[in-house]
Amino acid sequence: MCGLLYAHRRDGFPVGKSVLKRYHKQRERGKEGFGFLTIDKGKISGIHRFEKEAEMMEVLGASKSSNILFHHRIPTSTPNYKDMTHPIVVKNKMLDKDYYVIHNGVLQNEDDLK
């Protein structure tokens, strides 16, 4: 099972340390793969991916962003590779925008659900 977090401060103060504090409260939901994106002035300012917890904690704790979408995981369907961490970017010329997605779990019966 994964852990999902979103933090935003309207006053512009950084939220990285707040996200770390929340992460520690739900750490058992995943401590083997990490990713987060930062949003500043309405635009994505960074996408960060990590395999190691210590590296994630250093970068997240130092973040100056006031808007962070964070994901941490226990890999169940893929190995713990950096490029398998979230957020996942969804780009398609049929869409007006690109979307950055984090999710909890894998659908294995999508054809049945259709």
Image: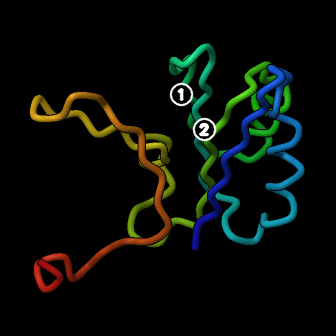
Work out how far the residue at label 2 is from the one at label 1, CA to CA, in angstroms.
Answer: 6 Å
Taking the image as shown, residue 107 lies to the left or right of residue 103, namely left
Q: Position of residue 58 (x, y in %)?
A: 82, 31
Q: Position of residue 63 (x, y in %)?
A: 78, 23
Disc 1 target residue: 47
Tag 2 and tag 1, C-beta contact below 8 Å: yes
Mark 1, residues whose alpha carbon is within 10 Å: few (<14), some, or many (≥20)? some
Taking the image as shown, residue 110 lies to the left or right of residue 23, namely left
* Type of amino acid at the residue the image marks with label 1: Ile
| Residue at (39, 69) in percent of width and height | 77
Q: Quadrant of residue 56?
A: top right
Q: Nearer the viewer, residue 84 or 24?
A: 24
| Quadrant, the C terminus | bottom left
Disc 2 target residue: 36
Taking the image as shown, residue 105 lies to the left or right of residue 57, namely left
Query: Mark 1: which secondary structure?
Result: strand
| Quadrant, the N terminus | bottom right
Taking the image as shown, residue 107 lies to the left or right of residue 74, namely left
Q: Position of residue 18 (x, y in %)?
A: 87, 42
| Residue at (60, 51) in percent of width and height | 71
